[in-house]
Image (cartoon, helix red, strand yellow):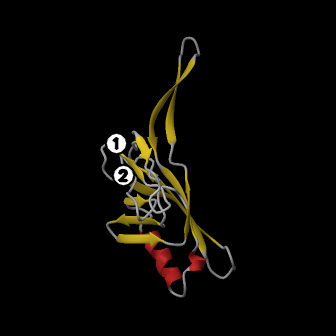
Amino acid sequence: MSIFGVSYSQISGSLGIIPLEHAQLDPSYINSEVEEHKSVLTGHISYVKKRIRSKFKITVFLCNYIGTDVYDKYNEIYAYKDIPFYFYPHIDGNPVYDLYNDPAEFYMTNFEPFYLTQDEYYDALIIEIESTVYNSLLPIAIAPPVGGYGILYGSSYGLGL
């Protein structure tokens, strides 16, 4: 459980809202793009740090859903495989924002079902998502705990967590 949210993740887009109640979030949200510049004359290499994109790896434990909910949840997530969506790291918080304080669009870059507890059908899956735009990491302050949990404030919610 993160101090920046106390609830599960959620995907939201044109096909509706998908709560990910039984999922583990592995964020690597501070991924800078670095461009290498090499001098043709001297061979000197310099690196230019570009902006930051958010990436998340999410393990969804389908085995924790009961009955036909396993297939429904799999199909709901699979439907977003090729279309953009918004991502809420915690349903009780805000989505990840771009540089202009608008919700950042994400695409699914990996969709990998696997066997976890048995070998008859897939009962877990790993999805990796990446923002299509640069994200903001502007001033962020953590307020004193409210009800035992911290709340993230600031001009942007760039970290997303």
| Residue type, mark 1 in image | Leu
Q: Amino acid at mark 2?
A: Ala
* Residue 86, quarter of picture: bottom left
Q: Please report whichever mark, 2 or 1, sits nearer to the chain's N-terminal start.
A: 1
Q: Residue at x 46, y 63 (%)?
A: 147
Q: Quadrant of the N terminus?
A: bottom right
Q: Position of residue 142 (x, y in %)?
A: 45, 48
The answer to whether the residues at label 2 and label 1 have Cβ atoms under 8 Å apart is no
Please say if 44 is above or below 131.
Answer: above
Element marked by disc 1: loop
User: From mark 2 to mark 1, how far is it between C-alphas?
Assistant: 9 Å
Q: Within 10 angstroms of label 1, few (less than 14), some, or many (20 or more) residues?
A: some
Please say if 77 is above or below 28. Answer: below
**In the drawing, what numbered circle is on residue 99?**
1
Q: Is residue 123 above or below residue 35?
A: below
Where's residue 5, x and y in %?
Answer: 47, 60
Foreground pick, 2 / 56: 2
Classify 10 Å Cα crowding around label 2: few (below 14), some (14-19), many (20 and above).
many
Image label count: 2
Kindly state the secondary structure of the residue where label 2 is placed: loop
Tell me residue 41's x, y (percent).
Answer: 54, 11
The residue at the far bottom in this view is: 67
**Residue at point 47%, 55% (across, down):** 145
Q: Residue furthest top?
A: 41
Which numbered marker is on residue 21?
none
Residue 10, x across and y down, in percent? 43, 66
Q: Nearer the viewer, residue 120 or 18?
A: 18
Residue beneath disc 2: 104
Residue at left offset 50%, top offset 48%: 29
> Which residue is at 39% across, 49% downward?
153
